[in-house]
Image (tube, rainbow, N blue to C red):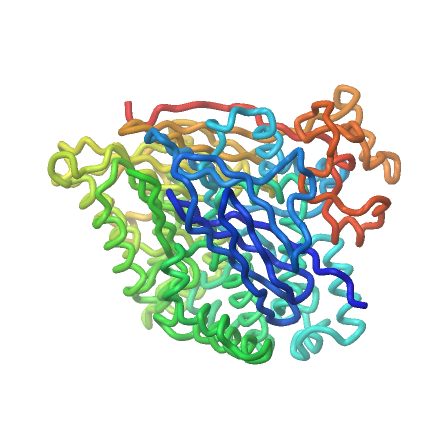
Amino acid sequence: MSPSPEILVGPLLRYVDATDATVWVEVSAPCRVTIRAGGEEVTEASWGVFGHHFAVLHLRQLRAGVETPYELELDGRTAWPLDPDRPSVIRTPRADDTVRLAFGSCRRGESQTPGALRKIGADALVALSHQMAHTDHDNWPDAMLLLGDQVYADIPSRDIAERLAERRRAGGGPQAVRDSAGAGGDRDVSGEICDFEEYSWLYHESWRDPDVRWLLSTVPSCMILDDHDLRDDWNSSHSWRREMTAQPWWRDRVIGAFASYFVYQHLGNLAPDELDENSVYQAIRTADSDAERERILSDFAVAADCERGASQWSFKRDFGRVRVVMLDVRASRHLEPGDRRVMDDGEWEWTRRACLDADVDHLVIGSSLPAFMLPALHHVEGWNEVTARDRPNKPVSARVGEWIRLTVDLEHWAAFRSSFDDLVGLLTEVAAREGTRAPASILMLGGDVHCSYLEEIDLTAPAAADSPTRVHQLVMSPFRNPLHQPIRVVNRLSVREPVPAITRRLARSVGVREPAVRWRVTDGVWFDNGVMTLVLRGRRASVQVDHAVVEWPARGLGKLLTLVPNLAPDSWGRRGGGRADGGERGGERGGGAPRQGATSPRERRQGGDSLERKPRQVLRRTVTKDLTG
């Protein structure tokens, strides 16, 4: 007799409006998945691909302005919530005009043991989940914007690295990947994630933590990709792409990356009507077999990588009088050295329409890469783009410039100057609208750089001279992946004179002109793991900056003891049977605990870390800033 199906990942609450919601889930075997919310019941048959099984459920009859608990059944058996004392809920938009958007990027989802917490710090998503457990629901985020590097395919955790090595020894994974072992340099990818099955391990590791699992089941999420979804420096330059696409393992890697991104992340970004119109999703739903679905996804993934216009990962969401535009600035790049663009023409035209068609109080533009870098770094990237161009009269300097570009990751908007200028022009066009059509704020959100800061932006073109629109860039990175100390020093120096003045002169020396915009860092730079939250109310906007800390037992002695191998027990910092917020009620599972007695690394990876196993993590407010006053 086959075992009953179980939920492997999720449920993830993805899209929510006044009446509709979508909930995504991965299950362990083919089954019928039923969701109940309020008086509505929806059932979908799971569909399979690459040995995994998924369902996207669409609720259509929610009540506006109401919080509704929901539950899931698999083949008629209740599978969610695991803990009735911590239900998952769907919160349709508030009766007032307040919108709260939490955001950030760059999260390593590996173990929450004390040793791991000492090395890479508190997990901001875990800390946010703990905060929500004892916070009035009106102060919960209405959505989370995850701005890239939700998974790290090229930097797997120790547990997954061991699992990869075991699979390679057993002859698992693409042949080209196994053959690459020991080749050295970029050609050796045998220790990296390469196909759909291995990508699924990353999502299981990252999203099965009980606190994160409950958070994502209750707060709608919007996600966009960045380089580590495929590989570090992905599409940073024409020479990088030329080298990588020539590798025998590249096609397998592309299929694993894009197919898994489409299933695990992108489907949930789409509104219900967009799901109905998505040809790839509909083809998957109507395919006769898992093998046919695998062919559809593989063909789509290959086309998405090499055919312009074959896919669009950018999308938009409206939250009342707030429009969020999430930009793909990684997969859609145009990389010709003489005309580098961070988005190709088709994606950029879509971006323009999404921003200019919005009659809103606040326009929020999410980009995995900051558009307005720290001053000195901005000038260095502009200088480098010019020097790295293929020029017959200066071949040596072009090669050196390209080497510098790849070595120190000079690949942000400033390193694609045509796109940077186009963006400044678009912001000016939006801000220069007449009368009340001009939004109160344009808020650029960024991640990637593993530090966080706030910037004020002044559009200097005459058209925007009298605009009431306030423009800011808010950068929050990482959720959990701290920056190395030497690079922290570079970032600190990049905002301190005379370094910005020196790099500005360097850029001018090769012909880089000043843009029609000025900006300055007003708060930060910070390097701790954390999360920011936009609070948008009418035509007012503010941001809350929170950083995550571990509450070590014995006034910090616990952290020191983790330096001694096998001395620190996994159970520090939590009361057995206590609530996620530290209360006394029973039901510690938080919606996703592993079975009792799961103690090995493999068992912890499959079941998620029990709340009893990790020190408590909390958010501490760093600053609250008014953005429109």
> Position of 424 compared to 77: left or right?
left
In the orientation shown, which residue stands out farthest toward the front? 39
> In the displayed image of the protein, which residue is found farthest to the top?
555
Question: In the picture shown, does residue 577 fall above or below 416?
Answer: above
Residue drawn 65% across and 56% down?
76
Query: In the picture, which quadrant includes the N terminus?
Result: bottom right
Image coords of residue 404 (percent x, y): 47, 57
- Along the line of sight, which residue is nearer the eye, 127 or 610? 610
- Where residue 166 sits, quadrant-wise, is bottom right
Q: Is residue 449 visible?
A: no
x and y percent of residue 197 in the render? 66, 67
- The answer to which quarter of the image holds residue 113 is top right
Towards the viewer: 169 or 267: 267
Which one is nearer the viewer's eye here, 312 or 487?
312
Q: Is residue 159 above or below residue 496?
A: below
Q: Residue at x 37, y 60 (%)?
A: 274
Query: How many marks overall?
Result: 0
Judge whether 624 appears above or below 16 on screen: above
Q: Is residue 35 above or below residue 563?
A: below
Horizontal side, residue 94 vs residue 425: left or right: right
Q: Residue at x 79, y 20 (%)?
A: 554
Please provide percent x and percent y for residue 299.
49, 78
Q: Quadrant of residue 185?
A: bottom right
Q: Position of residue 307 (x, y in %)?
A: 39, 75
